[in-house]
Amino acid sequence: MPTGGFAGGIFDVDGVLVDSPHERAWRESLRDLMENEWADIRGRTGWSADRFTPQVYQQVMSGKPRTSGALAGLEYFGVPDARTRAGTYADRKQTLLVKLIEAGQFHAYPDALRFVLAVRAAGIRTAAASSSKNAHLVLRRIRLDTLAAQEGLTYDFLRPGLTLLDFFDADLSGRDFARGKPDPEIFVTSAAELGSPPGDCFVVEDAVSGIQAARAGRMAALAVARADDAGPLAAAGADLVVSTLDEVDLPGLAAHRLARRSAGSPAGR
């Protein structure tokens, strides 16, 4: 049993650090297919534009590699020949996603910014571990120094031009792993690259599959519920579920504990 504080913090990207347009790209690309190329099978599915909700994205598709996410979505909506069609759906989503990212259709969550800076200031090494191969496109476009200045945050390790991509001690986002989440391979590899045993690391996730992966890897699991999905995240085994990372008790990390900060205690620093 670890006796010191956490040595590593491992962060998913989409939905945790950044409000990226993955959900929008999945939703709009499927609508385009259903209204055009796949119009002849639409009546044989359970799909409708209003049924593709944020909860469907979070609980069914989020956190999975691209083709796996496409297949999960098609199976959820009962699309015939889902396995055969998954590649087409994944490619359509990827094309739209890159366009949205290049157009700047995303933003960093301020609470996540405050949290990652405080984690680093506490001497905890950090890793980005997203299944998405597009995470680099987003992370390199977010200026951490600028956002910190806007939040009135100053730390010795901040330097001009620092991006979120530069911030992490290890970046495993978009790597090809034999098994995707909920398998813990990406998180166990992250811990190894941080030089810490898995049991000395915590994982920050917003998807059920990510929480399951953290638990399977014997890591502490911190869930941030940004889509009214606290229940499923708790049921997946999260050690702590918060609606914003400002709710996390920062001193608790030094005691190897994920806990909610007490009312009135400061957030961030």
Image (cartoon, grey):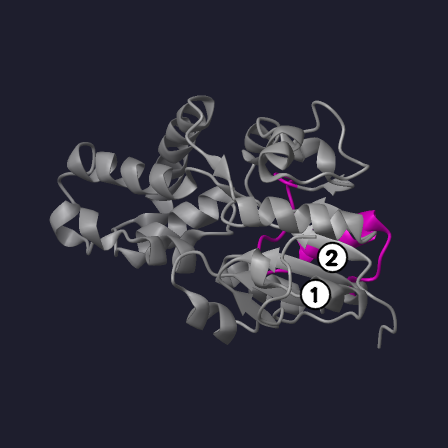
Query: Which mark sits nearer the N-terminus, 2 or 1?
Result: 2
**What's the amino acid at mark 2?**
Val
**Closest to the observer, 123 or 183:** 123
Q: Which disc number belongs to residue 217?
A: 1
Q: Residue at x 15, y 53 (%)?
A: 44
12 lies above or below 176: below
Q: Quadrant of residue 196?
A: bottom right
Q: Residue at x 48, y 61 (%)?
A: 243
The magenta stretch is 173-198
Check the image and report above or below for 59 versus 152.
below
Give the residue at the far front of this rendering. Answer: 264
Measured Cα–Cα span from mark 2 to mark 1: 6 Å
From the viewer's perspective, is 138 left or right of 104? right
Pick whichever, 219 or 106, lies toward us: 106
Residue 45 placement (x, y as % from top left): 19, 53
Residue 23 part of the magenta-drawn span: no
Residue 188, disc: 2
The residue lying toward the viewer, choosing from 136 and 150, is 150
Q: Nearer the viewer, residue 111 or 51?
A: 111
Q: How would you rate the neighbour count of disc 1 (Cα within 10 Å): few for under 14, some for 14-19, many for 20 or more? A: many
Q: Residue at x 45, y 26 (%)?
A: 104
Give the x, y percent position of residue 100.
40, 27
Is residue 62 visible in the rendered image? The answer is yes
Q: Quadrant of residue 169?
A: top right
Q: Is residue 197 magenta?
A: yes
Of helix, strand and loop, which one carries label 2? helix
Residue at the (70%, 62%) spot, across then down? 250
Residue density around tag 2, few if under 14, some if 14–19, many if 20 or more, within 10 Å: many
- Where residue 257 sits, quadrant-wise, is bottom right
Q: Amino acid at mark 1?
A: Gly
Compared to residue 99, the image places residue 206 above or below, namely: below
Residue 192 in percent (x, y) is at 82, 52
